[in-house]
Image (tube, rainbow, N blue to C red):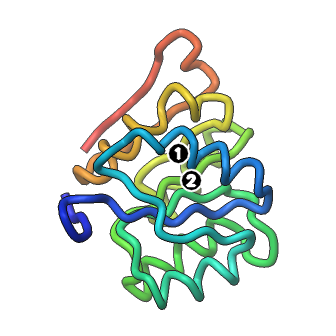
Amino acid sequence: MPIGEFGVVCVMLVDHQALMRQTISFLLASELDITIVAEAADGVKALGLAHDIKPNLVIMNLMTPKLDGLRVTELLHKQKLVDHVLLFCQDNRPTLVRRALDSGAKGYLVTSALQRNLVTAIHTVCRGEIFVSTISDRNNNVGTRR
C-alpha cells in the first residue's frame, strides 16, 4: 500500500459542504493509519492542493463545483498527483459508478453508506483493489475486486 510517512495514509477531502468534510474527518479521527492532510471545497482548489501536498488518497464528492469529481480524478491521475481516488455521491446509478471507475477512481461510495463503509473502502483502495458501495449496502451487498 503506498502510504505516507510513518505508515499513514495521507488523505485530502474534497466536498463543497464544510459539514460533510467535518463529518468525514470525525469518522476517520480514531483511525491511527489515516490522517487528513488537506481539505478543498471545489475541484479547482483540490487540483492546486494536490500539486502542493501530493496526498496518497483523495476522498471526493463526485458533484464538486467548478470542476466535477470525474474530471478532477482524470487530471489527478494524468498528472500523477495522487495514488488513489475514492469518490462518493448520493447517486448510485450503475452508469455513473462505471464512469467514476473509468475516470480512474478506485472506489465509489453512496453518501448514505459513508459511515458504515468508509474505513473499509480506504483500506481496500489503498491495497490496489476496487471498492464499490451502493444503496443496496443496507443488505450488506458490498463489492470489492482487484
Indicate the secondary structure of the residue bearing disc 2: strand
User: What's the mark number on residue 131?
Assistant: none
Residue 9 rendering spot, x and y as whole percentages: 32, 59
50 vs 95, left or right, is left
Mark toward the start of the polypeptide (1 vs 2): 2
Mark 1 → mark 2, Cα distance in angstroms: 5 Å
Task: Check contact, mark 1 vs mark 2: CB within 8 A.
Answer: yes
Image position of 78 with respect to 126: above or below:
below
Image position of 19 with respect to 117: above or below:
below
The residue that mark 2 highlights is: 87
Residue name at image x 72 percent, y 48 percent: 20
Indicate the secondary structure of the residue bearing disc 1: strand
48 or 69, which lies in front? 48
Q: Quadrant of residue 17?
A: bottom right
Q: Residues within 10 Å of mark 1 (few under 14, many from 20)?
A: many
49 or 76, which lies in front? 49
The residue that mark 1 highlights is: 108
Residue name at image x 59 percent, y 19 percent: 136
Q: Quadrant of residue 93?
A: top right
For the N terminus, the image quarter is: bottom left
Residue name at image x 47 percent, y 18 percent: 141
Q: Residues within 10 Å of mark 2 (few under 14, many from 20)?
A: many
